[in-house]
Image: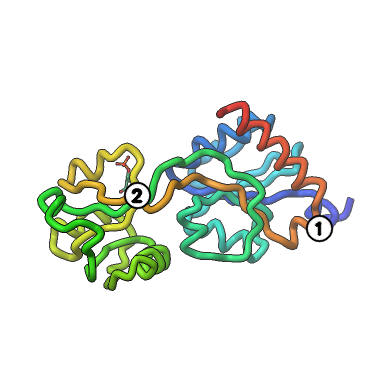
């Protein structure tokens, strides 16, 4: 087999670093993929199971859609927060039901009850999600100044950088420990399998086969 023919048979999959990685690996295992040799060396960012023709790479969660859109990866796993924020043209064949949390607006506990959301007219909001936040408040007719941060968003109101935050909440512990309370849930979040549109045309059988195996794994795990 020529190397380009071999390349056509390999599916490259971008997995997100961080808390989703363990659940994502668990799903592939449940789908029958032998993960025993994958990412044994923690510093190696690309790893293959050649017997199955799968190549996995680990990237920052925000970079997964980029790798998939450019075709550097055929498939990827990304949270719908990241997908909505970046709004790229990707095929989304499957909700993997992992990485479940919610995106919400939170404020300092001492502000709670002082001003109801129905009376909001303008505010400063810190977030990793400027696009989603802008759209959300635009629809509500509230003027916002967005302070874009890359992490530890909960600090912003404590230090007077913003009035409120838009961020993900899973257990609620980080909010609680930093004296913040939830005001409004914007959306429920989970991670999705995303696919490059050209890959789907070039490798339809392999991709559909893997999507079916993963769909069964999601059902089983659920
Ligand atoms: C996420 C999120 C919250 C926290 C919520 O941050 O942005 O800060 O988790 O989790 P909890 O409700 O279970 O406390 P992450 O750990 O990804 O780090 P970051 O703040 O650097 O983005």
- Give the left or right position of residue 187, taking residue 160 as reference: right
Q: Quadrant of residue 169?
A: top left
> To which residue does mark 1 refer?
202
Going 14% across and 48% down the picture, which residue do you hit?
109
Location of residue 108 in the rendering, given as x and y in whole percent from the top left corner: 16, 52
- Give the left or right position of residue 10, taking residue 194 as reference: right
Toward the top, the furthest residue is: 220
Q: Is residue 163 above or below residue 39?
A: below
Q: Is residue 135 above or below residue 18?
A: below
Instruction: Check residue 185 in the rendering and tell me which mark sits there, or answer none.
Output: 2
Q: Earlier in the sequence, mark 1 or mark 2?
A: 2
* Mark toward the viewer: 1 or 2: 2
Q: CA distance from mark 1 to mark 2?
A: 40 Å
Location of residue 99 in the rendering, given as x and y in whole percent from the top left corner: 46, 41
User: Of 137 and 168, which appears nearest the observer?
Assistant: 137
Location of residue 38 in the rendering, given as x and y in whole percent from the top left corner: 60, 38
């Amino acid at each position: 087999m020529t190397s380009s023919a071999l390349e056509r048979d390999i599916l490259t999959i971008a997995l997100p670093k961080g808390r989703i990685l363990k659940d994502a690996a668990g799903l592939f295992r449940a789908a029958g993929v032998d993960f025993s040799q994958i990412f044994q060396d923690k510093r190696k960012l690309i790893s293959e199971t050649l017997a199955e023709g799968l190549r996995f790479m680990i990237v920052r969660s925000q970079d997964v859609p980029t790798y998939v859109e450019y075709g550097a990866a055929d498939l990827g796993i990304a949270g719908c927060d990241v997908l909505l924020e970046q709004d790229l043209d990707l095929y989304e064949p499957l909700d993997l039901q992992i990485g479940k949390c919610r995106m919400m607006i939170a404020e300092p506990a001492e502000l709670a009850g002082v001003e109801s959301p129905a009376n909001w007219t303008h505010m400063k909001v810190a977030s990793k999600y400027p696009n989603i936040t802008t759209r959300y408040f635009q629809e509500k007719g509230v003027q916002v100044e967005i302070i874009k941060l890359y992490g530890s968003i909960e600090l912003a109101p404590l230090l007077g950088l913003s009035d409120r935050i838009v961020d993900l909440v899973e257990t609620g512990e980080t909010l609680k420990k930093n004296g913040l309370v939830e005001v409004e849930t914007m959306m429920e979040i989970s991670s999705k399998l995303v696919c490059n549109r050209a890959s789907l045309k070039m490798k339809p059988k392999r991709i559909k086969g893997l999507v079916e195996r993963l769909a069964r794994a999601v059902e089983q795990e659920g």
